[in-house]
Amino acid sequence: MSLNLLFAARSERWSTYERPLRSALEKAGFGDATLAMDLPPKDVDYIIYAPNSRLQDFTPYTRAKAVLNLWAGVEAITGNETLTIPLARMVDPGLTKGMVEWVTGHVMRYHLGMDTDILRSDAKWAPRTPPLAQERQVVILGLGALGAEVARTLVGLGFNVTGWARSPKDVTGVTCLHGEAGLAEALALAEIAVLLLPDTAATENTLNAKTLAQMPKGAFIINPGRGPLIDDAALQAALDSGQIAHATLDVFRVEPLPADDPYWSHPKVTVTPHIAADTRASTASEVIVENIRRGEAGEPFINLVDRALGY
């Protein structure tokens, strides 16, 4: 009996994913699988899922073996009480590479003072010698797949990298801290802080008035993780006081960022439109199909979500 795979995402994503998914299925020996956006719930074996799809009640899918998320973020689905089968989040090699490149670019921008060095005709000609990477402390908040890979890349460029996570982690070349005391220790070093934590009740407002004050005066913040990681009012106050020199924000509590949001006009904020990293259909399809292969072979799924932790 061939597999029935439900693609439960918005219709505009179907044209992007159909061909890469079919190609990955063919390579894995599932060329006869039925892949569609509309299947009888009782016949579905796997649900390829985006949390913003219409499917929110998983109760009718009595045969389904797993929900395979197309997004790295799962905060919009982990609390769904109708979802009782395994849920796998997306850890996409293409997304990871995109995130590494985006973060590295902005770390280098801050490290070298590129914004300052771009001169206009009315600017003062003032040559200076930028510091070396070995003279800069970078802190990564969040050492999951994305954070760990970003940290390793920055270590390779010569930066002093400290990583923090809620639980103990081990990343070669990175000073790894954890827990509340570890967060304070990490932030005290953070000339440049990169936020790559998941969005959970425990991580909301990780950067707040107290923790922002623990950072070195004139520090920089880069947030490609999740909007709720930052207390927005506290960050704006820290920017206004000079405690934080500048922030580059790619994610926000409300997206698109409302036209009247203060971040748009703040001279010490760079806004980017949630572009730091996106799932690549070609590489993500291979991850999805690998989990289908594992499910059919009776092997453990990869990238399983811990419902208690929320990621």
Image (spheres, rainbow, N blue to C red):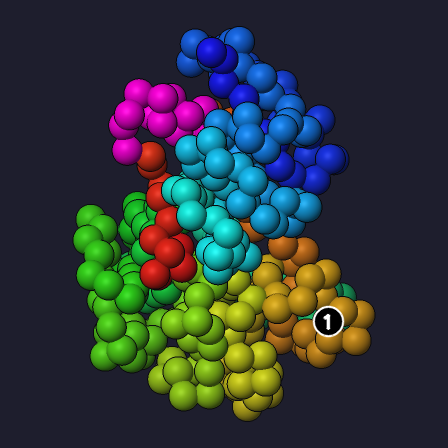
Mark 1 lies on a secondary structure that is helix
Whole-percent x and y of residue 107? 46, 58
Main secondary-structure element of the magenta-colored stretch: helix
- The residue at the point 28 percent across, 33 percent down is 300
Asked if the stretch drawn in magenta spans residue 288, the answer is yes
Q: Quadrant of residue 58?
A: top right
Q: Amino acid at mark 1?
A: Trp
Whole-percent x and y of residue 153? 35, 46
Please state the extent of the stretch shown in magenta in the rendering. 287-300
Whole-percent x and y of residue 109? 52, 58
Does the rendering let one see residue 282? no
How many other residues sit within 10 Å of disc 1, few (<14), some (14-19) or many (≥20)?
some
The residue wearing badge 1 is 264
- The residue at the point 57 percent across, 88 percent down is 237
Q: Quadrant of residue 135?
A: bottom left
Q: Is residue 131 left or right of residue 162?
A: right
In the image, residue 65 sits, relative to residue 165, either above or below, namely: above
Q: Is residue 256 left or right of residue 296?
A: right
